[in-house]
Amino acid sequence: MIPPVEAAFTRLEDRRRSLAARLAEMTAAQRDFRPQPEAWSSLQVARHVQLTERAIAGSLRRGAGGVPARRTWKQRLGNVVVGTVLRLGIRVRLPIRVVTPEEGLDLEAVSAEWERERAALSDLLEKVDRAALRAPAFVHPVAGPMDLGEALGFLERHFDHHLRQLARIRRCPGFSEAAPDAASPAVAEEEQT
């Protein structure tokens, strides 16, 4: 991989592994805990991040055909809004249904699928040259067209946004009670710091 792509991919992979470790430390009840009935569980948040990566990787595989090179004025404004939402952790409705996590998820199945998809993304990114880095690659439903560098940056900011969401879920009343047995030492230690 060319250095900027490799650096972005490594950061994404570090986040995925960290998230997988956090989910593995939780009990099944904690992974499925919802702060409110309409809210997502921790496992659904992880699945949403995975589905978002899948959608972008699919666009990268299909190539730039049909991806406009420039944003309209409305998309430029949308790009600012999306960046602000991700930075500030504002809760918004999903712009597309394809990244909506389903009910009744299994941690092992989600993790295995995500690992396969990450390996496929790695293979795809191995073929990227510097010219492809700035070529139109993906169209966000609100922010408009993004080149590969922008798409990878979006994935990082999107992941960070949802990592903060997971931290909020852990702090919710009832999350600790969702553990029928004692929390693992790593989780207990993290909660004390």
Image (cartoon, helix red, strand yellow):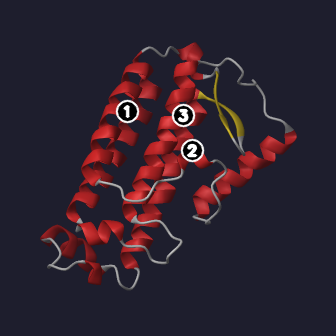
Looking at the image, which is closer to me, 76 or 2?
76
Q: Amino acid at mark 1?
A: Glu
Disc 1 vs disc 2: Cβ atoms closer than 8 Å? no
Per the image, the residue denoted by label 1 is 117
On residue 98, the disc is: 2
7 lies above or below 143: above
Label 1 and label 2: CA atoms lie apart by 16 Å
Mark 3 or mark 1, which has the lower sequence index?
A: 3
Is the C terminus in the top left, top right, bottom left or bottom right quadrant? Answer: bottom left
Residue at the image position 33 percent from the left and 47 percent from the top: 110
Is the N terminus in the top left, top right, bottom left or bottom right quadrant? Answer: top left
Callout in the foreground (1, 2): 2
On residue 56, the disc is: 3
Label 3 and label 1: CA atoms lie apart by 11 Å
Is residue 97 in sight in this rendering?
A: yes
Q: Residue pushed farthest right?
A: 73
158 lies above or below 185: above
